């Protein structure tokens, strides 16, 4: 299997980007071709053989990654598998690409693999980085219903069949949108604890737009993908969970602003998942109401 990698960067972490690219270059097996997308910024110096694309404006995370996909041909068709890696991450082991090749070869219905993210200093995996409700044991691999955006591998046939990431999301929940579409098309998603990306421990709320984007995109996600009966249930549950977490007044104001925006703005094409997909998500431990 041919493996490529897409990395988007704002150009502000040149040392971390170089370390990531070095870790990709050290992968066992055939060479992994890499495309680095400068998302509204110049790309720092990269090793020879690494292709670059510089965008005149920041298209957001999904928009930048979609540009990287197309750099490998329509829908990434020039390769069989694409790795999507954060520019401040680092592949912990030399066999990650080979493990991906083996996993996709052994399981023809496997469409997406979510890697384990671990802090390089402590080895800790944050609970939010385990893409399932039962997240207490990050060392347990399993089937899951979503994946981590900056540490994953996607079979390009999935992208050809269901499309890429939703550009308009800009940041937050774009992975779940793609995951639900892939699952609805019959593909499966695995979380693999043995495929590790080192990444410093961070809080998602460090982004200024976090609360607004999370709420807006949650509404878009439901409007685009869920059967009509489940849309109010899903959004009602998430509103309750948000209130129970007792965010600050400013955060709550931003969240409700994003929630209103999610209803008042276009969300893109609506393709509600089949009820058998709802049942599959439920059997996998995460019914699409939470």
Image (spheres, helix red, strand yellow):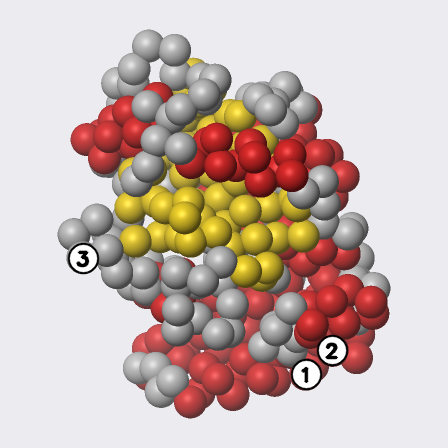
Asked which quadrant contains residue 197, the reply is top left
Which residue does the numbered mark 1 point to in the structure image?
A: 233
Query: Is the residue 284 above or below the residue 106 in the image?
Result: below
The numbered mark, 1 or 3, whose residue comes first in the sequence reads: 3
The residue at 76%/39% (across/down) is 161
Residue 90 image point, x, y percent: 30, 38
The residue at 33%/23% (across/down) is 26
Which residue does the numbered mark 3 point to in the structure image?
A: 122
Using the numbered discs, state the Cα–Cα distance from disc 1 to disc 3 in whole angstroms. Answer: 39 Å
- Point out the image quarter for the N terminus: top right
Asked if the residue at tag 1 contacts the one at tag 2, i.e. Cβ–Cβ closer than 8 Å, the answer is yes
The numbered mark, 2 or 3, whose residue comes first in the sequence reads: 3
Which residue does the numbered mark 2 point to in the structure image?
A: 230
Q: Of circles 1 and 3, which is in front?
A: 3
The residue at 39%/16% (across/down) is 50
| Left or right of 125, for residue 4 | right
């Amino acid at each position: 299997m041919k493996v490529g990698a897409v990395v988007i960067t704002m150009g502000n972490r040149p040392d971390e980007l170089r370390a990531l690219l070095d870790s990709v270059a050290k992968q066992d097996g055939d060479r992994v071709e890499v495309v680095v997308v400068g998302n509204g910024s110049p790309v720092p110096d990269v090793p020879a053989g690494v292709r670059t694309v510089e965008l005149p404006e920041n298209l957001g995370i999904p928009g930048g990654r979609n540009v990287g996909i197309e750099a490998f041909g329509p829908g990434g068709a020039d390769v069989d598998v694409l790795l999507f890696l954060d520019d401040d991450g680092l592949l912990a082991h030399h066999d990650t690409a080979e493990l991906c090749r083996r996993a996709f070869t052994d399981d023809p219905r496997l469409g997406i693999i979510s890697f384990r993210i671990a802090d390089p200093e402590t080895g800790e995996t944050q609970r939010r980085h385990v893409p399932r409700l039962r997240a207490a044991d990050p060392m347990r691999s399993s089937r899951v219903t979503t994946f981590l955006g900056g540490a994953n591998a996607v079979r390009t046939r999935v992208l050809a069949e269901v499309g890429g990431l939703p550009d308009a999301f800009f940041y937050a929940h774009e992975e779940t949108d793609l995951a639900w579409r892939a699952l609805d098309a019959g593909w499966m998603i695995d979380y693999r604890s043995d495929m590790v990306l080192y990444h410093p421990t961070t809080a998602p709320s460090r982004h200024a737009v976090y609360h607004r984007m999370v709420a807006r995109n949650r509404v878009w996600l439901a409007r685009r993908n869920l059967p009509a009966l489940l849309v109010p249930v899903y959004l009602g549950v998430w509103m309750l969970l948000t209130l129970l977490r007792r965010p600050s007044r400013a955060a709550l104001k931003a969240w409700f602003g994003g929630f209103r925006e999610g209803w008042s703005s276009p969300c893109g094409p609506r393709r509600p998942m089949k009820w058998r997909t709802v049942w599959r998500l439920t059997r996998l431990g995460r019914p699409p109401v939470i």
